[in-house]
Structures are given as structure tokens and as C-alpha cells.
Amino acid sequence: MAIQDILVHLDAAPRSSVRLGVAADLAGRHSAHLTAVFVIEQPPAAWFYGDPGGYVDARLIDEMMEKMRERAMVEASRVEREFRERLHRDGIEGEWRLVDGSTAETVALHARYADLAILGQDDPDATTVGSAAQVAPNTLLSSGRPVLMIPYVGTVATLAQRVLVGWKSSREAARAVNDALPLLRQAQSVTILAINPEEGIGGDGDVPAADIALHLARHGVKAAAAHTVATEISEADALLNHADETGADLIVAGGYGHSRLREFTFGGVTRTLLKTMTVPVFLSH
């Protein structure tokens, strides 16, 4: 697999510029086409009514929604200028898409026609409209494509130079490693980390992560196999801690090995990574 088409979700938030920078860098490194999607999502009219027993002038609501759309169009124009300037500066081929609709559904739909979707981690302090907070889960689960999540804080000085792969013998992890091959081939170092590895033919074998490291070697990726046992912290926290200790600038992991409902109810690796990531995370389902 090669990365020929990259989709980046842009919006009016300050971190949008960071995502654009990462997307442009990857597009340049892989000679890929870069598509930006900006979604204008307005709250439904019922959102303005408040107390169902109160009276609200429908014309006033229409005026408010029209003003919100006008403001969104101004913001979209600003982001489009930044996007086109970056394409011209870096000599990248690309296109701009401005779409009205549900942010989560729209981004997932457009991601199906790309090799990689670059999204932003949900900022818990930001005010989001409608489905914006569900962009990552929805795209990961319904697009059939890998996603690259960019944290809502911090800088991204380098990407995919020192890669940490969170490994377990699952379909999702195997899918993530395969989808990430174009990045792994260009990395300076790759570490495959098995956390709480299982024994036996259905688990990780006598030397955890060794089999997947050997598979990567046949693809020209020199990877080191490692394993650890985490009993007092979650597997996701163990992965994040290892990334911090080793200076990894990208984590690769399978996404939603359990159902999304189970992750929401009991927690899980994907949910924790999406909430507390400290470096970019590459996820595949």
C-alpha cells in the first residue's frame, strides 16, 4: 500500500493549522494528493427553542441561523486561503471541499475515498456544534480507512520518525500495522510493544511481538520487539508511558477491538488514547 490520497479535516479552531501542517508534510513526503474538507454544521432549529412551553419567533430563529452560517462562511474562507497558500508554497496537489451537513458523517464519507484521514483530538474545553465531537469515532468505525489523530495541545515537531506500535494478536492490530507500512518504512526506528502478552498459538508466542517484527522485516522495516506487564495501570496508559520514555513521535494501534458501547461503558485502549493522547496516534479498525 502507498499513501496517494490524504484527507484532512479543517475547521475554524486554532489547532486546524497544526493538522494542516502535518497533512502537508505527509503529502509532500509521499507525493500524495491532499484534500481538505470543511463542514458547516448548524444546530437544528429546535436547539434555539429552549423551554418547549415558551414562545419563540420563528423568524428570529431563521435570522440567528443565517447569521451563524454567514460567520461560518467567513471562517471557511479564511481557512481555505491558508490551505491554498500551503499547497502553493509546498508544491502539493490538492483540493478544497466545503460541505453543509453533519460533521461526523461528512468526514467519514469523504475519508472512504482517501488512504488516510487526518483528524484532530476532541478538545474538552472547546464548544462544539452537533456531531463535531464524534468525528474520530465515527470515521474510525465507518470509513474503512485508518485515521491519524493529532493532539489538541502541544507541537508536532516530527512525525513517524520514532514509531511505537502497540501490539496484540488481534485483527485490529494487524490491520493497523499493515495500514501504517508506508510510514513505518520511512521511520528511523520502530518498536513493537506487546503489553500483557498472552501465551499459546492464539496469543503472542514464546517471544512476544517477534512474529510481527519478522513480518515487518520482510517489508523492509527494521523493528525491535519488546513486551511489558502492566498490572497497576491500563494498557493504554502503559503504551503512552512507553512512548514518553522512549521519545516516540507516533503511536500505531488497532482501534475499537471491543464494541464502542463496551468501550464507552467500561473504558478501553481506544477510548483512553483518544482522550489522553500526548503524541499523534495512528488507528485502524
Image: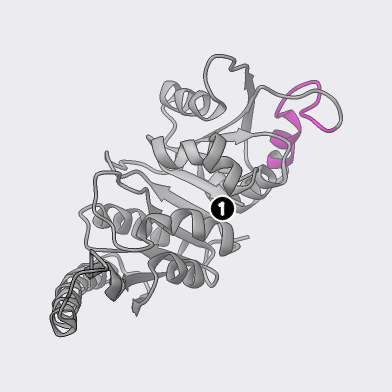
Q: Position of residue 251 (x, y in %)?
A: 49, 38
Queried whether the magenta region covers residue 12, the answer comes back as no
Is residue 162 visible from the viewing direction of this image? no
Q: Quadrant of the N terminus?
A: bottom right
The foreground one among 263 and 85 is 263
Q: Is residue 261 left or right of residue 47?
A: right
Residue at image position (27%, 68%) is: 52
How is the model colour-coded? one colour
Q: Is residue 203 above or below residue 183?
A: above
Of the pair 92 and 163, the residue shown nearer to us: 163
- Whether 97 is drawn above or below 158: the answer is below
Q: Indicate the position of residue 68 as horizontal and vertical percent values.
A: 17, 73
From which residue to which does the magenta span run? 202-216
Q: Which residue is mark 1?
A: 182
| Quadrant in the picture for residue 75 | bottom left
**Can you name the residue that lies furthest to the bottom here?**
59
Helix, strand or loop at mark 1: helix
Q: Position of residue 22 (x, y in %)?
A: 35, 53
261, above or below 197, in the image? below
Quadrant housing residue 102: bottom left
- Residue type, mark 1 in image: Pro
Residue found at x 23% / y 64%: 51
Residue that lies at the very extreme toward the top in this rendered image: 232
Judging depth in this view, the residue of 161 and 176 nearest the camera is 176
Most extreme residue toward the right is: 201
Residue shown at the point (43%, 64%) measured from the top left: 104
Q: Which of 206/123 is in front?
A: 123
Q: Is residue 152 visible?
A: yes
